[in-house]
Amino acid sequence: MDNFRSLRMLDAFRKLFIAVGIDYDVMRKILQLKLTMDDRRVPTIFDGANPEEGENHFLKSLGIYALYGLILIPFILLGENYMIQLSLVFGIIIFILMTTMITDFSTVLLDLRDKTMLNSRPVDNRTIQAAKTIHVLIYMVSITCAFVTIPVAVSLFSQGPLFALLFVGVLIFVSLFVVVLTALLYLLVLKFFDGERLKDIINYVQIILSIGIFLGYQLIGRSVEFTMSGFIYQFDWWHLFVPAFWFGAPFELLLRGDFSTPLIGLSILALLVPVISLIVYVKMMPSFERNLQKLLTHSSKSKKRWSGVNELWAKILCRTNEERAMFRFAGLMMEKDREFKLKVYPSLALSLFIPFLFVVNQTRFSSMDEVSSGNGYLSIYFCNFMIPAVIQMLQYSGNDKASWIFKTTPLEQITSTYSATLKSFIVKLYMPIFLVVSIGFTWLFSVSLLPQLVIIFLAGIVQTLVTYKLLDNEIHPFSKSFKFIKEAKSAKTLLLALVTGLFYGAHHLALKVPYVLPIYFILLLGAVVIGWALIFPKTSSKPLVR
């Protein structure tokens, strides 16, 4: 195992650990093993990137966090109001660190292997807990340093050494606050819910992190305008409940000499809340450890996931009982497979945001009346960009070993598994996104937009069929492991996403030429009906793969 640099630095405090009753040699060996195992874990920030095996994934991810840290620079360089600037800076830092703690280090905070493997060995709980705490701190310090090193260096030259020194000091309290708040959040969830609910929360936070990173790029383009617009900070009572304001207040208080009561109060909160939360966490640690056992249990309560509406869709869209059963199964897989959701849901969320971002960007150069009178609504086609990526992901599952059931079940129509899965994708994933965007665009533009929306929706279904046919998917969905996903990523997937542009161009052309739009509608409708019948015939000549 590697002799990690962090462990060599930790060796300087060996006597201190021994003085407080910790077996340092054992703790160091535990940490060395944990860090070695962590090198094999791919961070959430690389989701979809498929880094090479053998790489130090964590070290590489620090470079990515360093690039994300560039978003902080405009807030530091521009503007005259420290309170507003630094509140935004620490708001972004808290978001990144908090989501990272929940997504990538939940396995550290919620690690049960220590109890199962080490409690049977002559290792005392104090040493085990110290190894766990140091493990978290090593990664928190690493990510925080990677994220803020460039902004701190910029602040040193642009704002002076006092600003940079205060920035580093406040960051220590921010990091402490994030670690403790994350642990207390886990404790609260485990207190009232089971381990499965906590795993769902972690999964959704991972999705939020993926979305937040994309939206961060949008924030970069507007940050300069915001910081240069001369906003003046005015205190309001609800600022007492926003941590970003706590950590921004010391800069206005100490560097600008504003000793007003609100800023003093916010600065005290920045100092006291992390310390008090740490004391509370230490006191509640035994309860936290006891509740961690819930991660090994499953709730005995079960909900009926499929409502009458979904049953109605199954009866309307599926021709046989076999296909209806697969329709329900595919819907449950899309809803419950955490790894599938982590891969797919971010692209769904972006499909929800991008059409509106396109309209917002247009309003920066034209009035809303001008935008609504044009063809800006065609940006809804951005919803269809996610279709190839999702269709490809339908091959994979985190429970792929269970795919043997397809091979042992006497299916009358082999292709019915994918036919039902695509129908479930349209109903469960594509249609809800499309409906939300359509409602928003109908409100922004007018009700006369409805015929255009029907055409765009039909184009999405046609693109679904084209994508499935060209991707040459496996006969059965959810039958491959995600570890093989890298082999499937190719230029073909990107080109299939660009097919959306062809439908966009055809629609735009149909709007320009009189009487062509109804013909285009009929062609799309025919393509849906005939295409589905040809791709998924009622009888299949394909042999059953064993």
Image: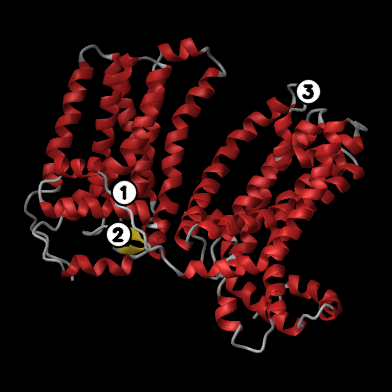
> What quarter of the picture does the C terminus occupy?
bottom left
In the image, taking residue 452 as reference, residue 372 lies left or right, namely: right
Q: Disc 2 marks which residue?
A: 478
Q: Residues within 10 Å of mark 3 (few under 14, many from 20)?
A: few
- Please name which of the two marks, 3 or 2, marks the residue nearer to the observer: 3
> Relative to the observer, which residue lies in front, 105 or 510?
105
Horizontal arrangement in the rendering, residue 540 relative to residue 222 (left or right)? left
Q: Residues within 10 Å of mark 2 (few under 14, many from 20)?
A: many
11, above or below 194, in the image = below
- Classify mark 2: helix, strand or loop: loop
**Image coordinates for residue 236, horizontal then vertical, percent:** 74, 28
In this rendering, does residue 465 appear at all?
no
Q: Nearer the viewer, residue 521 or 449?
A: 449
Residue 430 percent coordinates (x, y): 32, 39
Checking the image for residue 232, the label placed there is: 3
**Sequence order check, earlier mark of 1 and 3:** 3
Name which residue lies at 35% across and 33% down: 434
- Name the secondary structure under disc 1: helix
Between 366 and 401, the one nearer to me in the picture: 401
Check disc 3 and give the amino acid type: Ile
Amino acid residing under circle 2 = Phe
Residue under the image location 28 percent in, 41 percent down: 426
Could you tell me if residue 60 is visible in this image?
Answer: yes
Relative to 39, is 14 above or below? below
Residue 259, by quadrant, is: top right
**Mark 2 vs 1, N-terminal side:** 1
Q: Secondary structure at mark 3?
A: loop
Name the residue carrying label 1. 391
